Image: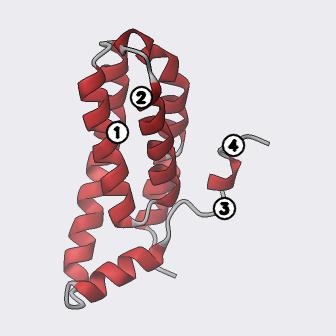
Amino acid sequence: MSEYDECTDALVDHTVLIGLQAELGGDPGIITAFVRNYVALLPWRVSRLHRALANLDIDDAMDAVLSLKTSSHMVGAICMNRLATELEMGIRLLPHADHLRELADQVRAIENFVPGTIRELESPIP
């Protein structure tokens, strides 16, 4: 069993979006737009991680992973949030930027969960 297998059951916690909608006055249009923006930017955020690692740019890698982690947390993308948190820890523990390429497998693991996360976010809330 892989350390990422636990992500296959539920990629999104829809109660997060329900709670956010309640906090924002109950307007479903705000949540719909918020999710739409997250979904539109998710592939770009992962691509940005790939570029930062390839360019050995530790500052951009950290900025990209924090953007992914924070936005994922806000929409309830629990697996994406957890994987981004693990990647953030990996970046913080690197002795220097030359070791960024060692994290490429983690970024590929994140990338593997993009389609499922998008699919769950675009599905009606159960």
- Tags 2 and 4 touching, CB below 8 Å: no
Per the image, label 3 sits on a secondary structure element best described as: loop
Which of marks 2 and 1 precedes in the sequence? 1
Which circle, 3 or 2, is nearer the viewer?
A: 2
Please, what is the three-letter code of the amino acid marked with disc 1? Answer: Val
123, 84: nearer the viewer = 84
Residue behind mark 1: 65
Which of marks 3 and 1 precedes in the sequence? 3
Say left or right for 85 vs 42: right
Please, what is the three-letter code of the amino acid marked with disc 2? Answer: Ile
Say left or right for 29 vs 83: left
Report how far apart the C-alphas of labels 2 and 4 lie in the structure: 18 Å
**Could you tell me if residue 96 is visible in this image?**
yes
Say left or right for 40 vs 12: left
Crowd rating for badge 3 (residues with CA inside 10 Å; few <14, some 14–19, many 20+):
few
Q: Quadrant of the N terminus?
A: top right
Which circle, 1 or 3, is nearer the viewer?
A: 1
Report how far apart the C-alphas of labels 1 and 2 lie in the structure: 9 Å
**Could you tell me if residue 124 is visible in this image?**
no
Per the image, label 4 sits on a secondary structure element best described as: loop
Which of marks 4 and 2 precedes in the sequence? 4
Which circle, 4 or 3, is nearer the viewer?
A: 4
